[in-house]
Amino acid sequence: MRQLLLPALLASLLAPVASAQDVEQRPEVQAAAERLRDDVIQLRRHFHQHPELSNREEQTAAKVAEHLRALGLEPRTGIAHHGVVAIIEGGLPGPDIALRADMDALPVTEQTGLPFASEVTTTFNGQQTGVMHACGHDAHTGILLGVADALVAMKDTLPGRVMLVFQPAEEGAPEGEEGGASYMLEEGLFADFKPEAMFGLHVFSSLPVGTIAVRQGPLMAASDKFSITVTGVQTHGSRPWGGVDPIVAAADLIGSAQTVVSRRSDIANQPAVVSFGSIQGGIRYNIIPDKVELVGTIRTFDEGMREKIHADLRNVAEHVAAAHGATADARVPDSTGNPVTVNDPALTERMLPSLRAAAGADKVIEPPLQMGAEDFAYYAREVPSMFFFVGATAPGIDPATAPSNHSPKFTLDEASLDLGLRAMLQVTLDYLHGAG
């Protein structure tokens, strides 16, 4: 989940999602969950201990492909660098669907103290850092491998076909590279197999274990990265009048940029966020530098608002810098961002009973709009899709204060693996059998 900036979801304050009908948990789902529980835990722990960054998931992809081959499948590898795709052919006629798990980790130094904690280190953006599955993609990969095992075991009586998508680079490709969901689509993911529905999940620290959160329509925000370079004239710190101070101009720009949302955007319609994440400028205490570089993120739910915020931020940057005698090169956005993640309303309504069957009727809730972003959004633009959250925080820990996804202390209760498997398997079987 890219650049996760989410408020805690207080499940006790959220109403359970209403459902038009009840569906029983399939006995084959419960049997598979019990049979595979230890296997999924061990797979997740293996991936957790051996994390790899975006577009570098070589060993992860090899492990996934090896496991799929052991199940008798014939995975395609090397899609969008390290993507792995396999198709389970059911023995009966039926629909085509796709299930997705992401595989990449983050440049985060782990501080969990787990016996299977990552000790991997690497260089990222010129700095030494640890590598950690701080967002739960290790869990997603383990869960989908478990679902694959369960579906293969029942494939003779399975209607239709299931595409398994193990995706690299959900957190974003490195600078100058392509990757992630959009690149998998560009490389022909759906060229020969166009599913009529697609499903994905994400473990989530802001929900207690045992809980599922899902909503129809927009779920997660569009995300855009921006870069602004403010250029002045270098001078000695003792005589600022001898140059043009880009630090003061940048500081004024950051303050003025807060009005882009608070005074220029109709947030009564949809929420929006403009956040600065890095300021780089200068190397010595008594030298006013010639430039300052700013980077940040924009989150929106409406395409018109998204375009307007881009234009407003460029306008603020250029004119505030000019007021100080400086110039601003505002690249807003400076790369292709994620669109809004939208759950198809009809599909989500249809599958709500399946989620309720897996978790319990009172454990499926509707979350507020989430400012975090997901490149699952690209699949959802191609085919009707549903993406849902699985609670990961252990009993006795307040989800509001638990270490969040992307934290070096992020941990999950492994019971979330069991619910994730049961939920995804129940949804898959109910859809293929025409239930819901």
Image: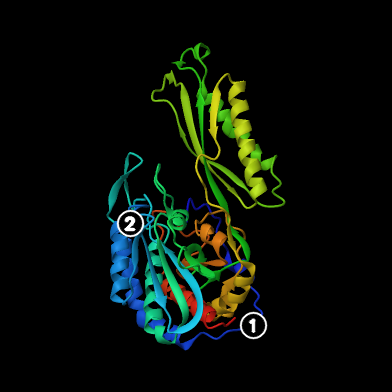
The residue identified by callout 2 is: 57
Residue 297 versus residue 400: which sits nearer the camera? 297
Q: Horizontal and vertical percent for residue 386? A: 55, 67
- What amino acid does circle 1 point to? Gln
Marked residue nearer the N-terminal end (2 or 1):
1
Q: Residues within 10 Å of mark 2 (few under 14, many from 20)?
A: many
Frontmost of labels 2 and 1 is 2
Q: Is residue 49 visible?
A: no
Q: Please name the residue shown 55% across and 27% down the image.
A: 328
Q: Please name the residue shown 28% across and 53% down the image.
A: 120
Q: Please name the residue shown 44% across and 21% down the image.
A: 289
Residue 157 versus residue 435: which sits nearer the camera? 157
The residue identified by callout 1 is: 21
Q: Horizontal and vertical percent for residue 306? A: 62, 46
Q: Are marks 2 and 1 in contact (CB under 8 Å)?
A: no
Q: Horizontal and vertical percent for residue 80? A: 39, 55
Tell me: residue 134, above or below residue 360.
above
Q: Horizontal and vertical percent for residue 365? A: 60, 70
Q: Quadrant of residue 287?
A: top left
| Quadrant of the frame with the C terminus | bottom right
Residue 289 versus residue 27: which sits nearer the camera? 27
Q: Please name the residue shown 41% across and 54% down the image.
A: 169
Total tally of numbered discs in the picture: 2
